[in-house]
Image (tube, helix red, strand yellow):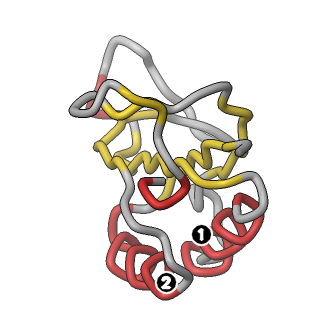
Amino acid sequence: MKYKKVSAIIRTHKLGEVESRLKAIGVKGMTMCQVLGFGEETETDFFNPNKLERHLKLEIWTTEEKAQQVANAIIETAHVGIVGDGLVSIAPVDEIFGIRTKQPATEAQV
């Protein structure tokens, strides 16, 4: 089985909608953390975190076949249409292991 990791940076207020949409397409779980950053059309000072934008970073491990569907769901749901909407990427994953079982993950676990 081949896997992919879908990573996304989204606006914090879009989390509920994105989470609901991902559950609706069968995503079983995700990792989320708050991040600070800057991007397009943002003046910033790395040494002044008060000038950095707050967003959420999502990471979802999924099958190669489902990765594009997951990415599209995030893009469609998180879209506002203005600077700061965020980014989505899809990256290859060589292997996934369950720490509890010490075994390679199965499709049912991802």
Front-lying residue, 72 or 37: 72
Please tell me how crowded label 2 is: few (under 14), some (14-19), or many (20+) other residues with Cα within 10 Å.
some
Q: Is residue 106 above or below residue 101?
A: below
Q: Amino acid at mark 2?
A: Arg
Front-lying residue, 104 or 24: 104
Q: Secondary structure at mark 1?
A: helix
Percent coordinates x, y for residue 9 in the rendering: 52, 49
Percent coordinates x, y for residue 56 in the rendering: 38, 51
Percent coordinates x, y for residue 3 in the rendering: 67, 43
Percent coordinates x, y for residue 11 in the rendering: 44, 62
- The disc at residue 74 is 1
Q: Amino acid at mark 1?
A: Ile
Residue at 64% x, 67% y is 70
Residue at 34% x, 11% y is 47
State yes or no: discs 2 and 1 in contact (Cβ < 8 Å): yes
Q: Which residue is mark 2?
A: 21
Q: Is residue 101 above or below residue 48?
A: below
Front-lying residue, 110 or 45: 110
Q: Is residue 108 above or below residue 40?
A: below
Q: Secondary structure at mark 2?
A: helix
| Residue with the most extreme top position | 47
Residue at 67% x, 79% y is 76
Residue at 21% x, 32% y is 100
Spatial CA span between label 2 and label 1: 8 Å
